[in-house]
Amino acid sequence: MTLPFCLCQFGDLRRYYADYCFRVRDPSPCAERITEVIVSGKKA
């Protein structure tokens, strides 16, 4: 179960970005992953 975007814990979101989005050194895949998270939150 996912929480509504407005109810996320920002510390958890920060850790998610650090663990999933910023593991790659190339900025393009990093930006794509961040965009996926934002779009997913907006859809929810």
Image (cartoon, rainbow, N blue to C red):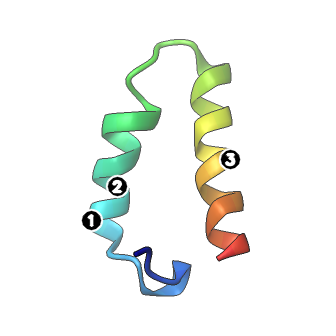
Tag 1: residue type? Gly
Label 1 and label 3: CA atoms lie apart by 18 Å
Circle 3/circle 2 CB separation < 8 Å: no
Q: Secondary structure at mark 3?
A: helix
Circle 2 packing at 10 Å, graded few (<14), some (14-19), many (20+), is few
Q: Secondary structure at mark 1?
A: helix
Task: Work out whether mark 1 precedes mark 3 in sequence or the reverse, and give the earlier one.
Answer: 1
The residue singled out by tag 2 in the image is: 14
How far across and down, in percent of the image, does residue 24 sit? Answer: 45, 17
The residue singled out by tag 3 in the image is: 35
Tag 2: residue type? Arg
Task: Give the number of the disc on residue 27.
Answer: none
How far across and down, in percent of the image, does residue 15 sit? Answer: 28, 50
Circle 3 packing at 10 Å, graded few (<14), some (14-19), many (20+), is few
Q: Is residue 17 left or right of residue 33?
A: left
Quarter of the image with the C terminus is bottom right
How far across and down, in percent of the image, does residue 20 sit? Answer: 39, 36
Circle 1 packing at 10 Å, graded few (<14), some (14-19), many (20+), is few
The label nearer to you, 3 versus 2, is 3
Q: Is residue 17 left or right of residue 9?
A: right
Label 3 and label 2: CA atoms lie apart by 14 Å
Quarter of the image with the N terminus is bottom left
Tag 3: residue type? Thr
Task: Give the number of the disc on residue 11.
Answer: 1
How far across and down, in percent of the image, does residue 27 sit? Answer: 61, 21
Q: Is residue 31 left or right of residue 17?
A: right
Circle 1/circle 2 CB separation < 8 Å: yes
Q: What residue is drawn where x is 41% and y is 45%? A: 17
Label 1 and label 2: CA atoms lie apart by 5 Å
| On screen, residue 44 above or below 31 | below
| Image quarter of residue 12 | bottom left
